[in-house]
Amino acid sequence: MRKVLNIYQSKNDKNITQIVAYKNNELLIEEYRNGFNKDDTMNVMSVTKSITSLLIGIAIDKGYIKNVNEKVMDYFKDEYTPKKGEKTIYDVTIKHLLTMTAPYKGKSEPWKVVCTSQDWTIKALDFLGGKQGINNEFRYHTLGTQILFGLIRKTSKMNVLDFANKYLFEPLNIEPRHSANCSSKEDQFEYLMNKGNHGKVWFLDPTNMPTAGWGLSLSAYEMAQIGLLVLNNGIYNNKRIISEKWINEMTKSYVSLDEHYSNQDYGYLWWLPHRNQDVIAAIGDGGNIIYIKKSENVVVAITGYFKPLIFDRVQYIEANIVQVLR
C-alpha cells in the first residue's frame, strides 16, 4: 500500500480524515487521519450534488424522466402554482438546474426560509425564475438542486432515499443511508460542524426527502466506489449501473468559469478542473472530493471535516497522490 507524499505543502490538509486512491481499478492508497477509520463517514457537503446528478441519470435511464430539455414546471403543475405574473419559471429546464444556469430571485440563497419549511423542494420553487428571464448565466445555487429530487419523487413515486439506496448504493455495495434525525436548526448546525464520524446517514427534510445539494455522509472508500463507477463509464463489478450515454453527457463542459471558480468548467453538477473531460471531480466544502483522471485510470477520494475556503484540493491530489501512482 503506497503512502501519500507531501510534495505539495498545503495549510489546508490538516482537516483531512480519509484518503483512498485507485489506479487501474486496484486499491493502492488508504490513509486514515484524525481518529477516522475506513468505515467512518463525513458530511461530504457539495459532493452530494454530483450524486444527485447520477440519480437523475438513473431516473432518465429508467424512463421516469424523459430528457434534460424538459421544462421543470411541466412536472409540478399539479402541485405548485407560481406567483401571479411569474413567467420565467415556465422556461426553466432540467438542464438549467444541472448546469447551474437556472435563474433565481434574490441576490443570496434563502437558507432560513427554505430550511425551516415543511417541504424544501416546493419552497425552493418559490425562488426559481424572476424578472431577468433565461440568460444562461452561471449561478451556483445549492437550494435549487433540491428541485431535482422533487422530479425523481414525482416521477418514480418513490421516496428518494429509497431510490438512491436501491439503484445506486446497493449496486455499489455501499450500505443504505438512513435519516440523520435532525429536526431543529441546532441539529442542522451540529451536523454541518461535526468533526467526528457521522454514520451511514443523509440529512432529510420534514417530508423525508434527502438534501440534494449537501448533507450526504460518505466515507472516502464509498466515494471511491462512486468514482470507479464514473471512471468505468457506468459499469461496476462488470454490471451496468448507469448508461455510458449519461456519464458522457454528465461530464461534458457546459459552462466555462473565471478565477472566482478557479478557472474550471462545469458539467452536470460535476467540475472539470482542467476544462476537459480527462479530469472530472465532485467537490464539496472542507475539501471533500472525488477526483477522476481518465487518461491514467486514477480515482482519488478524500474526506475532511468542515473548514472554510479550501480551494486547492485538486492541486494537492495531483502533486501528492497522482504523482505517487505513476
Image (cartoon, rainbow, N blue to C red):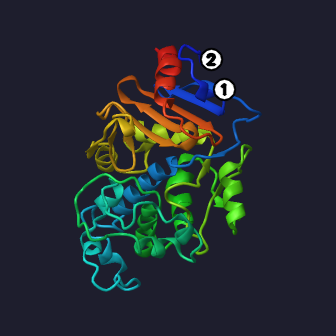
Whole-percent x and y of residue 152? 43, 68
Mark yes or no: residue 300 visible: yes
Mark yes or no: residue 232 visible: no
Q: Amino acid at mark 1?
A: Glu
Whole-percent x and y of residue 256? 27, 41
Q: How far separated are the C-alphas under marks 2 and 1? A: 7 Å
Whole-percent x and y of residue 295? 35, 25
Q: Residue at x 39, y 59 (%)?
A: 56
Q: How many marks?
A: 2
Q: Residue at x 50, y 25 (%)?
A: 317
Q: Which disc number belongs to residue 31?
A: 1
Q: Which disc number belongs to residue 66?
A: none
Frontmost residue, 235 versus 137: 137
Image side of residue 173 versus residue 186, left or right? left
Q: Looking at the image, is mark 2 or mark 1 earlier in the sequence?
A: 2
Frontmost residue, 247 versus 73: 73
Q: Residues within 10 Å of mark 1 (few under 14, many from 20)?
A: some
Residue situated furthest front in the rendering: 107
Q: Amino acid at mark 2?
A: Lys
Frontmost residue, 58 versus 109: 109
Residue situated furthest right in the rendering: 35
Residue indicated by mark 2: 3
Image quadrant in which you'd find residue 233: top left
SS label for mark 2: loop
Q: Residue at x 54, y 43 (%)?
A: 285
Q: Quadrant of the N terminus?
A: top right
Residue 121, placed above or below residue 196:
below
Is there a contact, CB below 8 Å, between mark 2 and mark 1? Answer: yes
Whole-percent x and y of residue 222? 59, 42
SS label for mark 1: strand
Residue 285, placed above or below residue 186:
above
